[in-house]
């Protein structure tokens, strides 16, 4: 897979011909088939060519007659095959939900009873929206109406487009109401965030001795963007990434000091500090004494 160390972020002005709502097919503009994120909502409808979608930390099938619902700022990738075809809809939060005053990164916390329109987006990592021929034909009719309207905007066009968009979302919510309500009751979105933080913790454990460990690589290991990981850590733990890494390194240092006889210089290296003096300074700041004194006090007990 393409490295995630440099993840592009797209605004409507970069990938859409309209500032609020835009619908297109493969012929209008090629799909972005490397990991990326948007500042806007996106729906992708697969018209042909089986593939997969990487969404958050999940890998899900994306066959023909499947819809994908992507939240703003959610890292994702759909590697469309050369002979595939699709329709893509981009729209802003203000277009769909002008009354909703919410940080786009916190949309998963809103109850589906309050804003049912968001349900497919919130649970895309846990559910595949694959339709049968009859239901997909209804979606294709709505897509045709939206594409025709969007090509010749007039007074009231935005209202009609929003109406068709809501019909599409309503159709999906109705078809998958059992699964969506069950995922909501089981707090699947919160579990998804915990799973993402678990992947970050695993990365920190594995890279704890690496002085070059950074939030960009940690986010990539969890299939998140650095901005989203920063937001997630602040929300779930109240800490920054640097603070979290320092706490883990200090814990490891205490374990080595109390239970081993390695020189302080080797412990510094094992805990990801390239400089012993810097390690001693940070340890003293955290524990009120240098590493050697800490060892003597705790090994004598």
Image (cartoon, rainbow, N blue to C red):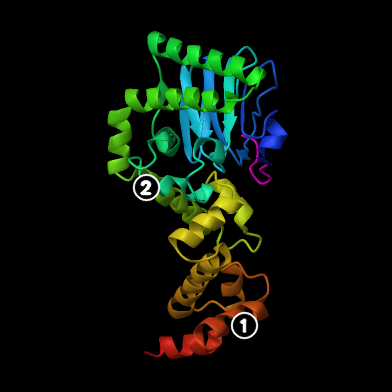
- In front of the other: label 2 or label 1? 2
Front residue of 83/298: it is: 83
Q: Residue at x 55, y 40 (%)?
A: 94
Q: Residue at x 52, y 58 (%)?
A: 204
Tag 1 secondary structure: helix
Q: Are marks 2 and 1 in contact (CB under 8 Å)?
A: no
Q: Quadrant of residue 7?
A: top right
Residue 153 on image: x %, y % = 65, 22
Residue 81 on image: x %, y % = 61, 18
Of mark 2 and mark 1, the one earlier in the sequence is 2
Residue 125 on image: x %, y % = 43, 36
> Would you say residue 106 is visible in this rendering?
yes
Q: In this image, 254 relative to 12: left or right?
A: left
Q: Is residue 2 magenta?
A: yes
How many labels, in total? Answer: 2
Q: In this image, 71 relative to 37: left or right?
A: left
Q: Is residue 244 above or below residue 100?
A: below
> Label 2 crowding class (10 Å Cα cut-off): few <14, some 14-19, many 20+?
few
> Label 1 crowding class (10 Å Cα cut-off): few <14, some 14-19, many 20+?
some
Given the current orientation, which residue lies at the most extreme front position?
A: 155
- Residue indicated by mark 1: 281
- Residue indicated by mark 2: 191
Q: Residue at x 35, y 40 (%)?
A: 112
Question: Which region is colored magenta?
Answer: 1-8
Front residue of 269/4: it is: 4
Q: Main secondary structure of the magenta part?
A: loop
> Would you say residue 49 is visible in this rendering?
no
Q: Is residue 90 magenta?
A: no
């Amino acid at each position: 897979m393409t490295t995630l160390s440099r993840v592009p972020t797209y605004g409507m002005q970069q990938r859409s011909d309209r500032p609020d709502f835009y619908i297109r097919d493969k012929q209008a503009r090629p799909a972005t088939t490397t990991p990326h994120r948007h500042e806007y909502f996106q729906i992708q409808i697969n018209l042909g060519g089986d593939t997969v979608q990487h969404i958050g930390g999940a890998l899900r099938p994306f066959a023909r007659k499947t819809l994908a619902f992507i939240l703003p700022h959610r890292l994702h990738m759909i590697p469309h095959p050369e002979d595939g075809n699709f329709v893509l809809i981009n729209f802003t939060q203000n277009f769909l939900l002008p009354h909703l005053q919410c940080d786009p990164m916190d949309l998963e916390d809103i109850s589906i009873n309050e804003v049912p329109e968001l349900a497919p987006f919130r649970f895309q990592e846990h559910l595949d929206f694959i339709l049968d021929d009859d239901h997909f034909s209804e979606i294709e009719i709505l897509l045709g109406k939206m594409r025709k309207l969007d090509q010749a905007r007039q007074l009231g066009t935005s209202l009609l487009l929003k109406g068709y968009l809501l019909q599409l979302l309503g159709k999906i919510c109705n078809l998958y109401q059992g699964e969506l309500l069950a995922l909501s009751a089981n707090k699947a979105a919160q579990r998804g965030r915990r799973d993402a933080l678990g992947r970050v913790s695993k990365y920190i454990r594995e890279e704890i001795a690496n002085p070059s460990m950074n939030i960009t690589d940690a986010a990539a290991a969890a299939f998140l963007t650095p901005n989203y990981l920063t937001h997630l850590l602040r929300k779930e733990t109240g800490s920054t990434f640097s603070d979290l890494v320092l706490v883990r390194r200090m814990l490891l240092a205490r374990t080595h000091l109390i239970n081993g006889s390695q020189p302080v210089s080797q412990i510094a290296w094992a805990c990801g500090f390239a400089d012993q003096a810097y390690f001693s300074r940070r340890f003293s700041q955290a524990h009120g004494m240098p590493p050697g004194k800490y060892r003597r006090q705790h090994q004598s007990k």
